[in-house]
Amino acid sequence: MRKHMDNLTALLRDSRPFTCKQCGGVMNYIGRGTYECENCKSLEYDDYGKITKYIEENGPSPAITISRATGIPRERITALLRDGRVEIPNGYNESVYLTCQKCGSRIRYGQVCPTCGAAMAGGDPKKMDFGKIGARPATGTGGGVKKSGYGNLADQLGDGKWRYRK
Ligand SMILES: [Zn+2]
Ligand SMILES: [Zn+2]
């Protein structure tokens, strides 16, 4: 997993804007993947910022739609999902979601499902790594989130929208 994180950090660093497109000034990081020019105050975004800006302006969208609109490769969006920085909302076709790296069940973000996350922690909630555990997509048409067992703990982190998680 260390390698995965390093790759993601490198990918985000590659997409970082260093100079202002308007005036050539230095871009300073102001949070949420957004950079501000120290001269003219215009804003630029790294991939993380572009994805979130798209979501804020267009609402929840599947990864493929965001990829087409922003030009960011879908694999990079997937890397952000695996890292838990963004999540796929409830209510999409099953094929849109990620799969648990242990059992293959569908999750909205992260690396493993709540069941496998609990098993990896020996059933001890204090040892559960919530940075890796993703919520399952809600099933059915009501959009309701299944509340049961360990799934409930992870589901409470999600509100059904693509969004920043940290
Ligand atoms: Zn500028
Ligand atoms: Zn699993």
Image (tube, rainbow, N blue to C red):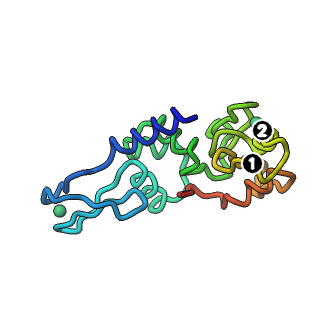
Residue 5 x %, y %: 51, 39
At a point 46% along the width and 39% down the height, the residue shown is: 8
| Label 1 CA crowd tier, 10 Å (few <14, some 14–19, many 20+) | some
Q: Which residue is mark 1?
A: 128
Looking at the image, residue 69 lies above or below residue 120: below
Task: Locate the N terminus and report the quarter of the image it occupies.
Answer: top right
Name the element at disc 2. helix
Relative to the observer, which residue lies in front, 28 or 43? 28
Q: Which residue has dot 2 on it? A: 120
Residue at left offset 81%, top offset 54%: 146
Taking the spot 22% from the left edge, 63% from the top edge, the residue there is 37
Graded by Cα atoms within 10 Å as few (under 14), some (14 to 19) or many (20 or more), the crowding at tag 2 reads some
Q: Nearer the viewer, residue 64 or 11?
A: 11
Left or right, 135 with respect to 75, comes to right
Position of 27 with respect to 92 (left or right) is: left
Of the four image quadrants, the one with ligand 2 is top right
Please provide percent x and percent y for residue 52. 46, 56
Q: State whether residue 113 is above or below residue 144.
A: above
